[in-house]
Amino acid sequence: MTQRSLLALIVVNAALLAGLMAMLVTPRTAEAQFTAGDRYTMISGLAAGRSNNAAVYLINLNNGAVAPIFVSTANDSLEVFSGRVVSRDTGSARGGGGGGR
């Protein structure tokens, strides 16, 4: 093997390694969605007033529906609540939904 072909192989391997590392290091977006038309996100945090609980809020970005889930660290259980549509709640608070001022 000549020195020129060895150098070419080293360059090709370095480029392949760089491409592989770029694919492994680059974060990917979550692609697990319930339906094709809806977009969801999750927000997690501590639950105010609830010791040993954490909260996860599932939010539908299309219509503003929020479904809270509380996770108990004491007994490893989930408590799922029925959701609310925040846009309706804020509309009624401004007097637009019939239940405001």
Image (cartoon, grey):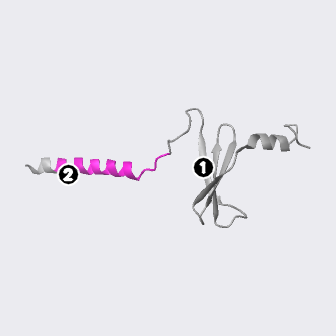
Task: Look at the image and say whether residue 10 sits in the magenta stretch.
Answer: yes
Give the amino acid type for the residue marked by disc 1 in the picture.
Met
Q: Which of marks 1 and 2 is nearer the N terminus?
A: 2
Q: Where is residue 82 in the image (x, y as percent from the top left)?
A: 70, 46
Q: Position of residue 21 (x, y in %)?
A: 34, 52
User: The magenta stretch spans which residues?
Assistant: 7-29
| Image quadrant assignment for residue 54 | bottom right
Total numbered labels placed on residues in the image: 2
- Looking at this view, is 29 or 53 the one in front? 53
**Residue that extends furthest to the top in the rendered view of this protein:** 37
Residue at (60% x, 36% y) in the render: 38
Task: Look at the image and say whether residue 3 sits in the magenta stretch.
Answer: no
Give the amino acid type for the residue marked by disc 2 in the picture.
Ile
Main SS type for the magenta part? helix
Q: Where is residue 57 in the image (x, y as percent from the top left)?
A: 64, 51
| Image quadrant assignment for residue 74 | bottom right
Residue receiving disc 1: 42
Point out the image quarter for the C terminus: top right
- Please rate how many residues cluster around mark 2, counting C-alpha atoms within 10 Å: few if below 14, some from 14 to 19, many from 20: few
Element type at marker 2?
helix
Residue at (88% x, 42% y) in the render: 100
Residue at (88% x, 40% y) in the render: 99
Cα distance between the residues tagged 1 and 2: 45 Å
- Please rate how many residues cluster around mark 1, counting C-alpha atoms within 10 Å: few if below 14, some from 14 to 19, many from 20: few
The numbered disc on residue 10 is: 2
